Amino acid sequence: LHILMIVTFIEEYPTKENLAKLKLVSFPTKLYIAAESLDAFFKIKEKIKSKWVKEVIYWPLLKKEEGYWMSPFADRKALKRIMQETVNVPLLWDAEIPRKRILMLKNILFFHSNKKLIRNFLSSHKKDVYCAEYFPERGLFYYFLKALGLEFSAKEYGDYEVKMLYSSMHNYSKEFIKKEIEEGVEDSDGKFIPAFGTLRIGARGDEKKISLEILERDLGIAKDAGVKEAIIFRLGGLTKEYAKLLKSYS
């Protein structure tokens, strides 16, 4: 059975230089573009002219002092601002704890109300939501992340589960990747999207570049498991060699 899989890209820093890497893409794709507001996103989107980009999705990021990523520890006003402007917009919801860890203490009193706010928003959202979450270990760690409001089941919320399976940062074995992807596809009714990489550093600053060999391994496992989409972090690190590999799997 030949499974069709689309290879897509995340771009955390949609500068002219990073978006110029689209000239290396010669296969149908879509982009997840970071911006601090919907207006800023639309301005960036207008500049993307590649015929290969079939869809551009908003990835809202808060200011660093607001929490940067979406979690119950983020600033409540900032969360509400993003929710109000994305009621009818497909989006990537990046569920991670704040870059400034002090915010976890500062906003602890709002944790439960923020968690409920997020759950209600994701449950009622009418457009596609792609929930980017930490690597998908099972067992106690899964329930710990769920308790922190950082884990959203596709069956429960109807969203797409984007799992950050960055082999270059965690040295995952072939067996681990295979097991997690196969279980993810089954548990999510096919709404499981692995994110592979990394090709270039992001906000954390410690991201390592994945080798061509390991990326090819991960993509092959995903395709064999029936994954419909695989995301690459991030577009700005694309080279001719990596683009050639990605095209062979797209």
Image (spheres, rainbow, N blue to C red):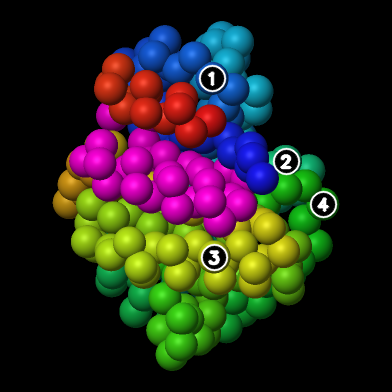
Task: Tell me the residue that label 4 is attached to.
Answer: 126
Mark positioned earlier in the residue sequence (4 or 2): 2
- In 3D space, how far apart are the residues under numbered discs 4 and 3 (Cα atoms)? 27 Å
Q: Kindly indicate the quadrant of the structure image that contains residue 106.
A: bottom left
Looking at the rendered structure, the number of numbered marks drawn on it comes to 4
The three-letter amino acid code for the residue at tag 4 is: Lys
Q: Secondary structure at mark 3?
A: helix
The three-letter amino acid code for the residue at tag 2 is: Val
Residue 165 sits above or below residue 237 on the image = below
Residue 50 sits above or below residue 125 on the image = above
Task: Tell me the residue that label 3 is attached to.
Answer: 182
Mark linked to residue 27 = 1
Task: Tell me the residue that label 2 is attached to.
Answer: 89
Mark linked to residue 205 = none
Mark positioned earlier in the residue sequence (1 or 2): 1
Mark positioned earlier in the residue sequence (4 or 3): 4
Q: Which quarter shows the N terminus? A: top right
The span picked out in magenta is: 211-237
**Which residue is depicted at the point 23% across and 57% down?**
169
Discs 4, 2 touching: Cβ within 8 Å = no
Q: Tell me if I can see residue 199 in this picture.
A: yes
Residue 189, x across and y down, in percent: 72, 64
Discs 4, 1 touching: Cβ within 8 Å = no
Q: Is residue 181 magenta?
A: no
- In 3D space, how far apart are the residues under numbered discs 1 and 3 (Cα atoms)? 25 Å
Disc 4 residue crowd, few under 14, some 14–19, many 20+, Cα 10 Å: few
Disc 3 residue crowd, few under 14, some 14–19, many 20+, Cα 10 Å: some
Relative depth, front residue between 184 and 237: 184
Q: Is residue 26 left or right of residue 238?
A: right
Q: Kindly indicate the quadrant of the structure image that contains residue 219.
A: top left
Mark positioned earlier in the residue sequence (4 or 1): 1
